[in-house]
Image (cartoon, grey):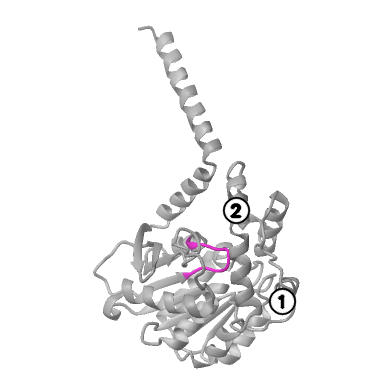
Amino acid sequence: MTSRTTLRRVAAVGVGLLVLATALLVARPDTLIDIDYARQRITAGLASSTLQVDDHRWTYAHTAADSSDAPLIVMVHGFTGSKENWYPLARALDGRYALAVPDLPGWGETQRIDGADYGYVAQAARVARFIERINPGGARPVVLLGHSMGGGIAALVAAQRPDLVSRVGLLDAAGVRFADNRFGKDVLAGNNPFAVTDARTLDRYVDTVFFDDAAKPWIPWPASRAYIARRVRDAAFEQRVLDGIGRGPQGFMPGNAATRIRQPALLLWCKQDAVIDASALDLYGARIPQATRVLLDGCGHMSLMERPDDVAGAVEMLIERGEPR
């Protein structure tokens, strides 16, 4: 076989693989998202597992089991978020602690049950049960981190189950009546300012939650098409959850419960947060006077993705010092 013939055959195989890959992406455009998420998870040193906890099947990322007594950090994402939001922070923590990063019930890859309650109270009870399952007998001290809606959930768990949580960190957390901003007014009016229905509203969503352009995720076509389609399918679910945590009687329960948090705590916000206004930092601080307060500049609502190194430093300070400041 001549080298020219070999080259032709190699080229033909390459073209065939390209056509096959293109067809796969057209048929399943979310493949691009799945591949990138897997890359981020592996880069952060995390494995993926599922776990049945009561009536929900959870999917979560985690560090490999080891025999050390390092604290276990449990990371709880926010409204419309997922476990993948925490991967930059997981990577910045660089293997110093054990990590468990779940998709909350109803979100991401964790099971959603029609008609189930996914408000603060129900989710806090589920997170407590999840912690009990992955940390049987309280083998490790647990550091519970919550972002946005997840911050409200974390505040409830820390207040109600101090036996499970030794330290708590609230990042850009919902659950208090912060100073009015555009996002808050929309929520109180019964709207979903995070709603995504097309390319324009996807851009608006990204611009709302991120301040730092360099940290904004790039979602190429056809992955953007798949993401938009999923958010459209989830629109009614999102609205029900948002009504419950934003306008319903549970809206400010996390802030009220925070007065019972006695553990060492971290409160971390970004000055340019256009979702949960930075005034919430002092509101939570008044309820958790022992908390260390950190206000970052140059980032928006997604501090854990925009400033992961700074957040990692604050989390490390919470764990290693854990003393009121």
Q: Position of residue 21 (x, y in %)?
A: 49, 32
Residue stretch rendered in magenta on the structure:
76-83
Position of residue 205 in the picture relative to residue 261 (left or right): right
Q: Position of residue 222 (x, y in %)?
A: 60, 41
Q: CA distance from mark 1 to mark 2?
A: 28 Å
Q: Quick one: label 1 or label 2, which is nearer the N terminus?
A: 1
Secondary structure type for disc 1: helix
State the mark number for residue 217.
2
User: Furthest-front residue in view?
Assistant: 115
Instruction: Give the residue at x 31% y 77%.
Output: 140
Instruction: Give the residue at x 35% y 60%.
Output: 50
Instruction: Give the residue at x 49% y 22%.
Output: 15
Position of residue 21 in the picture relative to residue 137 (left or right): right
Q: Which residue is mark 1?
A: 188
Residue 214 seen in render:
yes
Inspect the magenta stretch and tell me whether residue 168 lies in it: no
